Image: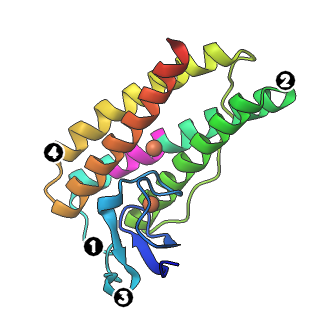
Amino acid sequence: MAKVKVFRCRICGDPYIGVEPPARCPFCGALAEYFVLAEDWNPNEFNMELSDIARQDLEAALKLELDNTAFYSCALNVAKEGGDEYGFAKFKALMKVEREHASAISKFLKIDKPPLETVPCSDDFKTNTQEGWEREDRAIKAYAKFRDEVPEGRLKEFFGALVEIETDHLDLHAENLG
Ligand SMILES: [Fe+2]
Ligand SMILES: [Fe+2]
């Protein structure tokens, strides 16, 4: 049997035990290329001086992530109450990933993750999937802009990874709408 190792995701910082890095981080959704062996982890990965523009962009990203976390939280509860197991699983997974993004951004900002506000949603799976698609589309556009404008290479990488992850989510919603 192949031996397992400890890896860490450079986008969310979470550890993972496996034979190889996963194709997608189970916590934040980042691609396998962002994993390093735990022995090679840089303890200052989230500890950096932030330019004004980086701070602004991280604060805007945090708002988006918290809002999307709260939206998916509503959607998963509605699905659960309606006995829709697929909708529950999908929206719960999305909620957890967006919550992880909010945590990672809070680490860069050196703040505690702010509490969630209540965000309304529909009681219909397709309507929530359509709204999810629109939310992911907005996030992708914002993060592509942030990636291109921040001077810090590490944050270009971080926002670039978020663009990839939210594009996975967009494609998933599109699949369910088709
Ligand atoms: Fe991750
Ligand atoms: Fe996100």
Residue to which mark 1 is pinned? 48
Q: Earlier in the sequence, mark 2 or mark 4?
A: 2
Q: Residue at x 47, y 80 (%)?
A: 6
Q: Earlier in the sequence, mark 2 or mark 1?
A: 1
Alpha carbons under labels 3 and 2: distance apart: 46 Å
Mark 3 residue type: Glu
Image coordinates of residue 129 in percent, x first then y, are 58, 21
Q: Is residue 120 left or right of residue 149?
A: right
121 or 55: nearer the viewer: 121
Above-or-below relation of 94 to 45: above
Q: Earlier in the sequence, mark 3 or mark 4?
A: 3
Q: Earlier in the sequence, mark 3 or mark 2?
A: 3
Query: Count the marks: how many?
Result: 4
Q: Find numbered disc 1 in the image and state the secondary structure of the residue it sits on.
A: loop
Mark 4 residue type: Glu
Alpha carbons under labels 3 and 4: distance apart: 32 Å
Alpha carbons under labels 3 and 1: distance apart: 21 Å
Residue to which mark 3 is pinned? 39
Residue to which mark 2 is pinned? 82
Q: Residue at x 35, y 51 (%)?
A: 58
Q: Quadrant of residue 171?
A: top left
Q: Residue at x 41, y 36 (%)?
A: 168
Does the magenta stretch mainly form a helix, a strand or a loop? Answer: helix
